[in-house]
Image (cartoon, helix red, strand yellow):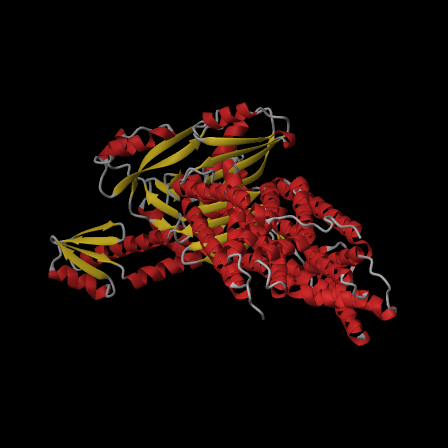
């Protein structure tokens, strides 16, 4: 008997030491430890959830279908070129993810299908429509999600967030967690920007161009598009430049007729940085193309001298300067009415590259730092209050035995935190609630034991055998009463969102540890007392 | 020895008809709540319903009416406002089942900033749940409920005889329905955190039941010649004090959470308090009488 008691105390001691080691990183003492200790021993401890340290949790859907449609548009332009080269007259249009070619003559089909072997053709009413095979479309979508993840990671890294979590969920969703972000709105905008940069010619030569008003109110945009829908040339479309009057903050929009053809994209950028225009003291973004891009830019600007080239980012025209002369060297400026911060973010997204497809935000949970701090404070007070109340109750109700139970309870909480630290588990506000509930449930085990012992004592058993048979008889009841709570905790872990997972973690660890401390710990204490001397009465 | 309840001898089973009536009403409230959820008339949180919730903290005390005007002026309709005057906080909820729900918070914040320009605000929290996520959360919640029920049923069925399983299951359902029903009747929000509490209650509900059942089983072996009703009554009386004491400890913890745990888990704590109280009641007045009704009052001759 004596030997097993020793072993049990050793086990508890070991668990206590391990808990200290794992919990150390969560205390200020960790910083005082020698370098060698900090690099070789556990250094992460318990991680605070977003709801406690403040931060944002975002779920985005990558609209892979848009990437598929873009591929289709590119292919259609190539098909047009291909047919032109062979001197075949045909009308090539795109409609969602389909390329429609009229007429569907054998020659036309042969030329197209000779190059695009995997496209699926469907002929109807004198036209033939081509679409990507499901496999190809899926590959493009998949790739878009993967690329979007990389791009967003890049942007966040440059934005400067410590320990961001960016992960893929399912086929086309991305989860972004940014702890401790000070300006959530700015971060969300930065991540969500598609940042597809395009250079397109302004179609000032079209007869209709002179009729278009110079400036409109934002609300009139749709009306204007409708009004000119039938009048503008087939290869052009209406786009808008946004203006903010610095004094009145009034927003106006300047409509422009743009060629549909994209003269150049921002894919070949090598650098983008913020610079200040010394004349007006306004920020602008200076971009530099790589060698290939510089060559293309020179060619494009050479072709369009004395014409206006619009710089478009995600459907908004930033500026449309007149090209004075061919620009060599691959430098360009994106000016527009934006603040220093906006210019900075613009340079980040341009550097990090564009998203392969637009992303749509499905969920945004933002917790401000002050609410997080309040929650931590409230959690501390609630835990302490629960501990004091429960411990005092046990002490009053069960006297010395209650003290043993309180000792077990203290160890219980300590081990619970230790295990969480060892797992680098995330502590959330519901997680704190789980700890508090675990405090209440932990002593239940001892209550069941003590009540059994009281039963046995009433039957006239000696304290020693009352303890032993109390343990034996209460054992199954204790297991039964805990297992179902564990079942639901496991379910919550499986199906719960972040904070609720935290609850499931603390509650289930709490319950398992509770079985350990009361069945091994408390028993060891009782046995220890008995090995010293045969006690005459039990303080219970 | 301090004893909460000295040797007692109440006739619990004799009151089972009154108990069944009370339990029936409580369960009915829960069923009404489920019907209301199904018909979309219950007060669902935005995590299930989709929408935007913005919690703002004001520097100076704020007039709720003024905030409501400000939000309304920006063209946002159907905003629900909750005032937390002691903390100078206002919660603005807009339930919306469409794509526009995500991204609405900027508009709300700007509107309030404009409307109460003299009072500086800080954004405490924002949650925007799009219809897709709302749907996913609803489906996940459904699976969580099903998985918990199946898990508990399997365990109970494995550990107890059939009539006890029926009693334990009835008590568990009763507890969950009762708490859900109370939330519904008082118009409190039915959200993810309540679901968490309900599942926890379902798990915990069995704790008290097990304490009673274990003793009934034990006594049935000794008192197999007595009518079941007497055995059950005796058993409940014997373990009454531990049934209550185990609940008291969890109740003390839940009350601490309710009083000091802060706004985030206020409702969770409330649900737990109700759940623990109802759970204790049900182990005596639902689980045990159901066993009695199910197995009949004839002596159970079953030696093991």
Viewer-proximal residue, B27 or B257? Answer: B27
Answer with left or right where residue A539 lies relative to residue A365: right
Regarding residue A158, the answer to whether it shows in the image is no
Answer with left or right where residue A52 lies relative to residue B36: right
Residue B104 in percent (x, y) is at 46, 37
Answer with left or right where residue B128 lies relative to residue A88: right
Residue A505, image quadrant: bottom right
Residue A144 in percent (x, y) is at 40, 57
- Residue A244 vertical position relative to residue A286 in the rendered view, above or below: above
Regarding residue B198, the answer to whether it shows in the image is yes
Viewer-proximal residue, B280 or B183? Answer: B280
Residue A357 in percent (x, y) is at 39, 52
**Residue at position x 79%, y 75% from top?**
A1
**Residue at position x 21%, y 59% from top?**
A82
Residue A378 in percent (x, y) is at 68, 43
Answer with left or right where residue B287 lies relative to residue A138: right
Image quadrant where one finds the C terminus of chain B: bottom right
Viewer-proximal residue, B14 or A410? Answer: B14
**Residue at position x 49%, y 51% from top?**
A351
- Residue A404 vertical position relative to residue B193 in the rendered view, above or below: below
- Residue A278 vertical position relative to residue B293 in the rendered view, above or below: above
Residue A147, image quadrant: bottom left
Viewer-proximal residue, A509 or A461? Answer: A461
**Residue at position x 28%, y 55% from top?**
A72
């Amino acid at each position: 008997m004596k030997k097993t008691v020793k072993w049990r105390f050793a086990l508890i001691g070991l668990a206590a030491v391990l808990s200290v080691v794992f919990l150390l990183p969560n205390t200020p003492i960790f910083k005082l430890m020698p370098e060698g200790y900090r690099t070789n021993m556990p250094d992460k401890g318990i991680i605070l959830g977003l709801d406690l340290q403040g931060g944002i949790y975002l779920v985005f859907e990558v609209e892979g279908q848009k990437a598929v449609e873009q591929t289709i548009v590119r292919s259609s332009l190539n098909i047009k070129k291909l047919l032109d080269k062979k001197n075949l007259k045909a009308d090539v249009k795109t409609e969602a993810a389909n390329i429609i070619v009229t007429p569907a003559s054998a020659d036309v089909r042969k030329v197209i299908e000779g190059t695009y072997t995997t496209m699926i053709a469907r002929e109807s009413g004198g036209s033939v429509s081509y679409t990507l095979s499901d496999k190809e479309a899926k590959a493009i979508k998949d790739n878009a999600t993967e690329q979007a993840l990389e791009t967003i990671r890049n942007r966040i890294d440059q934005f400067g967030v410590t320990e961001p979590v960016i992960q893929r969920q399912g086929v086309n969703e991305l989860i972004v967690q940014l702890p401790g972000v000070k300006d959530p709105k700015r971060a969300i905008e930065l991540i969500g920007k598609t940042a597809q940069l395009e250079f397109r010619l302004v179609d000032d030569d079209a007869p209709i161009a002179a009729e278009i008003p110079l400036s409109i109110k934002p609300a009139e945009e749709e009306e204007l598009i409708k009004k000119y829908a039938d009048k503008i040339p087939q290869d052009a479309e209406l786009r808008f430049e946004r203006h903010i009057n610095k004094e009145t903050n009034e927003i106006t929009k300047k409509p422009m007729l743009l060629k549909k053809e994209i003269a150049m994209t921002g894919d070949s950028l090598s650098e983008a940085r913020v610079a200040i225009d010394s004349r007006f003291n306004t920020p602008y973004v200076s971009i530099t193309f790589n060698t290939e891009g510089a060559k293309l830019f020179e060619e494009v600007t050479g072709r369009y001298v004395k014409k206006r080239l619009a710089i478009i980012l995600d459907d908004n025209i930033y500026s449309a300067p007149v090209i004075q002369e061919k620009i060599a060297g691959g430098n360009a400026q994106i000016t527009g009415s934006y603040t220093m911060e906006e210019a900075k973010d613009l340079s980040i997204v341009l550097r990090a590259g564009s998203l392969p497809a637009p992303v749509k935000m499905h969920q945004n949970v933002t917790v401000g730092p002050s609410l997080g701090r309040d929650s931590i404070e409230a959690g501390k007070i609630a835990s302490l209050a629960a501990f004091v109340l429960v411990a005092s109750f046990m002490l009053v109700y069960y006297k010395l035995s209650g003290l043993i139970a309180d000792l077990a309870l203290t160890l219980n909480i300590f081990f619970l935190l230790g295990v969480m630290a060892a797992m680098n588990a995330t502590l959330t506000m519901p997680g704190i609630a789980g700890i508090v509930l675990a405090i209440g449930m932990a002593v239940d085990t001892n209550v069941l034991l003590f009540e059994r012992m009281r039963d046995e004592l009433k039957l006239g058993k000696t304290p020693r055998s009352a303890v032993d048979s109390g343990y034996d008889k209460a054992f199954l009841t204790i297991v039964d009463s805990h297992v179902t709570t564990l079942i639901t905790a496991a379910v919550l872990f499986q199906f719960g969102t972040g904070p609720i997972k935290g609850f499931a973690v603390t509650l289930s660890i709490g319950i398992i540890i509770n079985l350990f401390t009361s069945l091994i710990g408390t028993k060891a204490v009782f046995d220890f007392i008995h090995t010293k001397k045969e006690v005459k009465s039990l303080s219970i | 020895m301090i004893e909460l309840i000295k040797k007692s001898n109440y006739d619990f089973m004799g009151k089972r008809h009154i108990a069944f009536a009370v339990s029936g009403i409580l369960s009915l409230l829960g069923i009404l709540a489920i019907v209301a959820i199904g018909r979309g008339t219950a007060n669902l949180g935005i995590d299930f319903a989709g929408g935007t919730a913005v919690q703002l903290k004001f520097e100076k005390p704020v007039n709720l009416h003024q905030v409501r005007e400000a939000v309304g002026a920006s063209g946002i309709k159907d905003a629900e406002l909750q005032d937390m005057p002691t903390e100078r906080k206002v919660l603005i909820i807009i339930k919306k089942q469409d794509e526009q729900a995500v991204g609405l918070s900027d508009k709300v914040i700007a509107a309030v900033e404009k409307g109460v320009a003299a009072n500086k605000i800080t954004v405490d929290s924002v949650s925007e749940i799009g219809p897709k996520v709302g749907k996913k959360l609803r489906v996940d919640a459904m699976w969580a409920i099903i998985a918990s029920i199946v898990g508990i049923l399997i365990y109970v069925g494995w550990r107890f005889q059939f009539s006890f399983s029926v009693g334990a299951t009835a008590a568990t359902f009763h507890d969950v329905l009762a708490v859900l029903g109370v939330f519904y009747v008082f118009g409190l929000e039915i959200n993810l955190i309540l679901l968490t509490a309900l599942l926890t209650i379902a798990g915990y509900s069995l704790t008290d039941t097990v304490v009673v059942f274990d003793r009934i089983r034990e006594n049935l072996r000794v008192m197999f010649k007595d009518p079941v009703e007497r055995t059950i009554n005796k058993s409940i009386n014997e373990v009454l004090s531990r049934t209550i004491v185990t609940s008291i400890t969890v109740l003390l913890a839940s009350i601490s959470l309710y009083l000091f745990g802060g706004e985030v888990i206020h409702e969770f704590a409330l649900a737990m308090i109700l759940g623990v109280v109802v759970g204790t009641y049900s182990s005596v007045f639902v689980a045990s009488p159901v066993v009695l009704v199910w197995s009949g009052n004839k002596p159970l001759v079953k030696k093991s």
